[in-house]
Image (cartoon, rainbow, N blue to C red):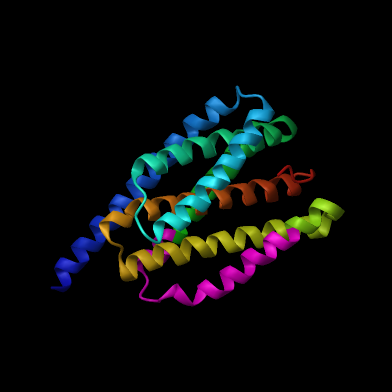
């Protein structure tokens, strides 16, 4: 029975991470398309992206989302992400962006391996992550009106990196410990995609600050 459970869990994990890889490729295609869009349209797509996240959260409570929704979302997400990428590339060069992507992939991989292979249950992180996310949102709102000092900007970036590494640990560990119904695999793919992208943005922000510039998003 234990062996069957392990095989099933490994199968689900494989499906989720294959879906994640496909969603990142789809987002990459969206980035390419997004570089050719005017900023006004990108801003509209950003609102669409937020609306899709809210819709997915409410729909998930009654009916699972499917892969078409996930890939549509990640493509739009890639288009909106292109603005941040171009902003950093114009100031620091594309090399910094690629380094940030490599660091993100490495951190995500290490955190995923730790979370999936440890016997520790990381569900206790949930409350801390919620508080940390609210702190990030509050700091972001304050910064919209007052701006960030150099120290506050650095703290914000480090906090964001720590929180989204925490989300990777939390989500992958929950998946490994408790599994997920097959119809909810697309939702887990979307959750891990958001973990990856947000981690990438905060690492990019941090590397930009450490390179002597201000954050761009």
Q: Position of residue 200 (x, y in %)?
A: 58, 48
- Quadrant in which the C terminus appears: top right
Q: Position of residue 48 (x, y in %)?
A: 56, 40
Q: Is residue 109 visible?
A: no
Report if residue 127 lies within the magenta region.
yes
Viewer-nearest residue: 144 or 98: 144
User: Compared with residue 141, is residue 79 higher up or lower down, i.e. above or below?
Assistant: above
Residue 60 left/right relative to 138: left
User: Compared with residue 132, is residue 142 higher up or lower down, i.e. above or below?
Assistant: above
Q: Position of residue 49 (x, y in %)?
A: 55, 43
Residue extent of the magenta highlight: 112-139
Q: Main secondary structure of the magenta part?
A: helix
Report if residue 148 lies within the magenta region.
no
Q: Residue at image x 58%, y 69%?
A: 130
User: Compared with residue 214, is residue 41 higher up or lower down, i.e. above or below?
Assistant: above
Q: How many marks?
A: 0
User: Compared with residue 51, is residue 150 higher up or lower down, i.e. above or below?
Assistant: below
- Considering every residue shown, the one lying at the far front of the view is 62
Q: Position of residue 164 (x, y in %)?
A: 56, 59
Q: Residue at image x 63%, y 35%?
A: 44
């Amino acid at each position: 029975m234990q062996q069957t459970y392990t095989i099933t869990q490994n199968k689900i994990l494989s499906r989720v991470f294959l879906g994640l890889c496909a969603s990142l490729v789809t987002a990459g295609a969206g980035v390419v398309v997004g570089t050719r869009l005017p900023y006004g349209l990108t801003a509209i797509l950003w609102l669409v992206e937020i609306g899709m996240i809210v819709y997915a959260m409410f729909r998930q409570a009654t009916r699972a989302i499917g892969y078409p929704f996930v890939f549509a979302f990640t493509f739009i997400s890639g288009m909106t992400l292109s603005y941040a990428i171009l902003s950093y590339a114009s100031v620091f060069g594309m090399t910094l962006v690629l380094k940030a992507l490599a660091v993100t992939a490495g951190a995500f991989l290490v955190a995923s391996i730790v979370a999936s292979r440890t016997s520790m249950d990381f569900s206790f992180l949930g409350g801390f992550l919620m508080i940390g996310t609210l702190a990030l949102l509050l700091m972001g709102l304050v910064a919209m009106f007052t701006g960030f000092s150099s120290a506050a900007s650095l703290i914000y970036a480090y906090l964001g990196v720590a929180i989204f590494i925490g989300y990777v640990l939390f989500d992958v560990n929950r998946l490994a410990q408790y599994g997920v119904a097959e119809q909810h695999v697309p939702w887990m793919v979307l959750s891990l995609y958001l973990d990856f992208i947000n981690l990438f943005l905060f690492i990019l922000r941090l590397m930009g600050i450490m390179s002597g510039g201000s954050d761009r998003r």
